Amino acid sequence: MPRKKMNFVLKAEAPIAILRSRATSQFVKTLDYLPGSTVRGAFAEIFINKRGIDEDFKRIFVEEKIRFSDFLPSNSTDPPLLMPLTAAACKRHGLEHQESLRDRLWEEMKSSTPAKQRCQCGEPLDRIGGYLSDMTTRQKVEIGKQLRMHVGISRATGSAMQGLLFSYEMLTEKSASFVRPENVAPRRGGADKMSALHPVTEALPSSLKKNLMFVGMLEADAVDAPEVFAILQQVVPDGEHLSIGKARTRGLGELSIVSRDEWSAPKDFDQRWESFNKNDSANCFFAITLDSHLALKDKLGRPVLDDLSATHFGFGEKEQVKLCARFLAPAVVAGWNAAQGLPKPDTHAISRGSVLAFSAPKDSAEALREHLQQLETEGLGERRAEGFGKLTICHPFHSKFGKE
């Protein structure tokens, strides 16, 4: 069934801390994005505070008429690109050497022992993560982080407890981009130290210190979309403030809704498929790239983490689909149910950014394309209303940076 999407832009008004794992140690790192389940919970909290658990609330959040994607950090209002696990760049300089950006999927598909590539500076290439503003400029989204430290308080005395010190990481509400002061000229002779540390920021106006943005999608069936999106607009309008993550009562986790616009997904599936299959092989190839965590279970209810095959994606024996390359990573997703005041059970999933490549006989290409288009539209696995199970078929990143 066709689906309609709304592109939402959230602006960080305060530092944000969404812990990667439960706080069982003295130091906990933060996620660098907003999980769909977290944003969905913030919308639900506003809905309950304003209208309670009415029929509209049940339609949107219980019957899951609206799906919330992960919200990714961006230096603008444009959707960024999550770099897949196949991405590699200069081990020493990263994307400061932008021409070193490569995709390793095709190397893995063609050879069991891929050649070791090097950057123009002579350094080897290594795995790189993060987000790109776009694939043309290869500009990486800069995210600022801070460390907040606390001293534990003794319940008996009400004062600091000896030996109890803990800290957690948080995202700053301002972009990490550095702008050179106008009265500071680059150093003569050799590379400029400021440019080396922040290669993409000198093009920004000197007065610019932007708030960090988060861009994501809300989607619904085409039949239900006009009504449920109108209800959500009425209850949670533009300018509304959301509260998410850790330490909200201490001033953290505040965001505001900047804009929402109907999103028309580019109809480029055929172009992506043809670009991925520019060869005279007797087989056709396709890649499945995870845009969010994928939660799959086998027939016994156990999580599927690494023993993936074509059957998990709905292919039968007649299609003769074979796995020819994979880049996988596991993820343990914790959560909190604000309505119940209880932690959610941990979800074991395949991490976003994971990539699987398959091959099949060319005479089955048409049937494969139809199934894959539906898979890309509907998603896969559990908890899809919370952002899980989103994927892209034949992602252009693999063709652009893997076949250059």
Image: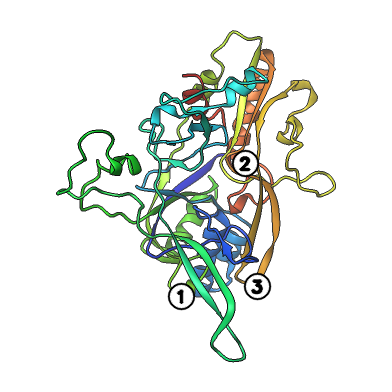
Q: Which residue is mark 1?
A: 250
Residue 131 in the image: above or below residue 32: above
Residue 347 appears in which quarter of the rendering?
bottom right
Residue type, label 1: Arg
Nearer mark to the viewer, of 2 and 1 = 1
Question: Of 43 and 186, which appears nearest the observer?
Answer: 186
Horizontally, residue 94 falls left or right of residue 177, namely right
The reply to whether callout 2 and callout 1 are in contact (CB within 8 Å) is: no
The reply to whether callout 3 and callout 1 are in contact (CB within 8 Å) is: no
Label 1 Cα neighbours within 10 Å, binned few <14 / some 14-19 / many ≥20: few
Name the mark on residue 154: none
Q: Is residue 1 visible?
A: no
Colour scheme employed for the rendering of this structure: rainbow
Name the mark on residue 379: 2
Q: Is residue 371 visible?
A: yes
Marks 3/1: CA distance? Answer: 21 Å
Lower sequence index among marks 3 and 1: 1
Lower sequence index among marks 2 and 1: 1
Question: Of 77 and 164, which appears nearest the observer?
Answer: 164
- SS label for mark 1: helix
Residue 312 position in % (x across, y down): 74, 36
